[in-house]
């Protein structure tokens, strides 16, 4: 079995707030080597939307985002369009819309699970690119969701925390498979899940109150899976 690139869900680095990288240090070989390592992992993961450095044990504010995500498309692998990634260093959300929408999210740091997560529909993000140049992004829809998810990682927050923050009784964290389940079973469960959530959306116009047959609550998430609670950034 190939070792995972990702630290376990209960690893302390996933609960650490990463300190900004000084602009003059972005070009340093160490930082550039970390960026290369992240890009190499992205190339090995069909359909990856984004990746944050803490997920592979590096407590730095570096994220890579799939170019398909930037087009507000879910990067579902189709075998014809290779994934490519853009690099964002010290990303921060400057503004977000008051409007919130629900959609499903998964994460390589929380394997075998998905959740229905509330996110702002529109965000403005400021960051530095791989050369240190400042970039300003106006994002909406799926691309805005991906950036919020990855920026949460560099602030020590995982997506189930967002689900349970304002609604501890929510049933939005759904178990799809265990690591030891056969691949075919995992694929079928994911297919069934996507089909169920699609049917719910079609019937109700949104995925508010969507539930799955295996749901996980706040206590289970914090005490048994992550073994920790987020330190919310003030």
Image: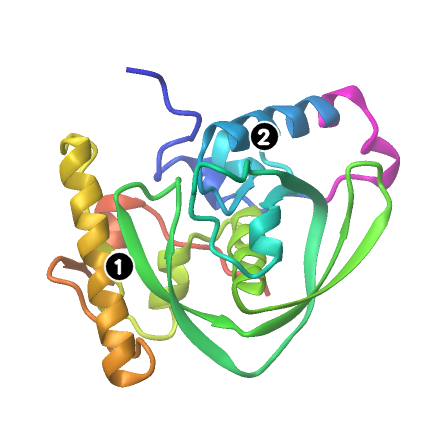
Q: Secondary structure at mark 2?
A: helix
**Dot 2, crowdedness within 10 Å: few (<14), some or many (≥20)?**
many
Residue 25 part of the magenta-drawn span: yes
Q: Quadrant of residue 136?
A: bottom right
In this rendering, is residue 107 above or below 72?
A: above
Q: Report the magenta residues as a range.
A: 20-31
Residue 30 part of the magenta-drawn span: yes
Percent x, y of residue 16: 53, 43
Q: Which residue is mark 2?
A: 38
* Residue positioned most to the left: 213
Q: Is residue 88 left or right of residue 64?
A: right
* Nearer to the camera, 30 or 37: 37
In this rendering, is residue 170 above or below 81?
A: below
Q: Is residue 27 left or right of residue 191?
A: right
Which scheme is used to colour this image of the protein? rainbow
**Which mark is first along the chain, 1 or 2?**
2
Q: Which residue is mark 1?
A: 194
Instruction: Say which residue appears at 36% left-offset and 33% top-offset.
Output: 8
The reply to whether discs 2 and 1 touch (Cβ–Cβ < 8 Å) is no
Which mark is in front, 2 or 1? Answer: 1
Residue 76 circle label: none
Q: Quadrant of the C terminus?
A: bottom right
Instruction: Say which residue appears at 74% left-offset and 26% top-offset.
Output: 32
Can residue 175 be seen here? The reply is no
Percent x, y of residue 1: 28, 15
Q: CA distance from mark 2 to mark 1?
A: 28 Å
Q: Quadrant of residue 105?
A: bottom left
* Nearer to the camera, 108 or 234: 108
Instruction: Say which residue appears at 14% left-offset and 31% top-offset.
Output: 182
């Amino acid at each position: 079995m190939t070792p995972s690139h990702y630290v376990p869900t209960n690893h302390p680095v996933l609960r650490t707030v990463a300190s900004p990288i000084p602009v003059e240090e972005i070009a340093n070989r160490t930082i550039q080597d970390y960026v290369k390592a992240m890009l190499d992992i992205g190339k090995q993961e069909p359909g990856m939307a984004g990746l944050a450095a803490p997920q592979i044990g590096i407590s730095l504010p570096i994220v890579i985002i799939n170019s398909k995500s930037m087009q507000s498309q879910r990067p579902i692998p189709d075998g014809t369009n290779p994934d490519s990634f853009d690099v964002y260093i010290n990303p921060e959300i400057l503004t977000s819309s008051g409007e919130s929408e629900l959609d499903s999210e998964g994460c390589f740091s929380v394997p075998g699970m998905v959740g229905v997560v509330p996110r702002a529909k529109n965000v403005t993000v400021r960051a530095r690119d791989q050369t240190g140049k400042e970039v300003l992004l106006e994002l909406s829809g799926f691309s805005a969701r991906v950036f919020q998810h990855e920026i949460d990682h560099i602030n020590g927050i995982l997506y189930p925390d967002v689900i349970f923050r304002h609604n501890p009784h929510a049933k939005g964290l759904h178990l799809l498979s265990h690591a030891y389940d056969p691949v075919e079973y995992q694929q079928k469960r994911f297919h069934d899940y996507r089909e169920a959530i699609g049917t719910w959306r079609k019937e109700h116009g949104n995925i508010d109150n969507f539930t799955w047959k295996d749901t996980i609550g706040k206590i289970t998430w914090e005490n048994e899976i992550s073994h920790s609670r987020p330190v919310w950034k003030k």
